[in-house]
Image: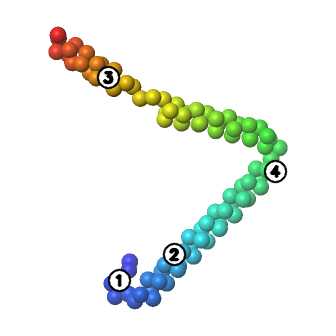
Amino acid sequence: MVNASESRGGLDERAVLLAAGLADLAVSTLGSGLGLVRGLLRRSDTAEMAAAAERDLEARGRLVLDRYASPPPAHLEVLARHVLARRVGDGG
């Protein structure tokens, strides 16, 4: 916790330490990722894995397009359904 009586140099030092920590985390994550990629490239079933990943990406793309590209229901149609539901609920 930062005290109000802490000097400006202390806050600057904390900022530098936080930035250095974030940079170290990024470098170690990148290193781990590269190691993982190297391991995947050494596998004998790389072509099959790539084909499966491509199929998965296509399926995800279809889902996204279906979700966002389909037109919303017509406004008047929605209102008409509400009116019919009220009439049925009111008995008339």
Q: Name the amino acid type tagged 1.
A: Asn
In the picture of the structure, the residue carrying the numbered disc 2 is: 18
Judging by the rendered image, the residue that carries numbered circle 4 is 42
* Residue 37 position in % (x across, y down): 73, 54
Q: Nearer the viewer, residue 29 or 70?
A: 70
- Residue at 74%, 41% (x, y): give it: 50
Between 67 and 31, the one lying in front of the other is: 67
Give the foreground label among 4 and 3.
Answer: 3
Q: Are marks 4 and 2 in contact (CB under 8 Å)?
A: no
- Circle 1 residue: 3
Secondary structure of the residue carrying tag 1 is loop
Mark 4 and 1 residues: CB-CB less than 8 Å, in contact?
A: no
Quadrant housing residue 61: top right
**Residue 63 at what x, y percent from top left?**
55, 33
What's the residue type where badge 2 is placed?
Leu
Q: Earlier in the sequence, mark 1 or mark 3?
A: 1
- Badge 2 density bin: few <14, some 14–19, many ≥20, Cα 10 Å: few
Answer with left or right where residue 76 lies relative to residue 45: left
Left or right, 61 with reference to 3: right
Between the residue at mark 4 and the residue at mark 1, the CA separation in whole angstroms equals 53 Å
Crowd around label 4: few <14 · some 14–19 · many ≥20 (10 Å)? few
Q: Residue at x 24, y 19 (%)?
A: 83
The CA span between labels 4 and 2 is 36 Å
Amino acid identity at mark 3 = Leu
First of labels 4, 1 by sequence position: 1
Callout 1 touching callout 3 (CB < 8 Å): no
Q: CA distance from mark 1 to mark 2?
A: 17 Å
Q: Which residue is mark 3?
A: 76
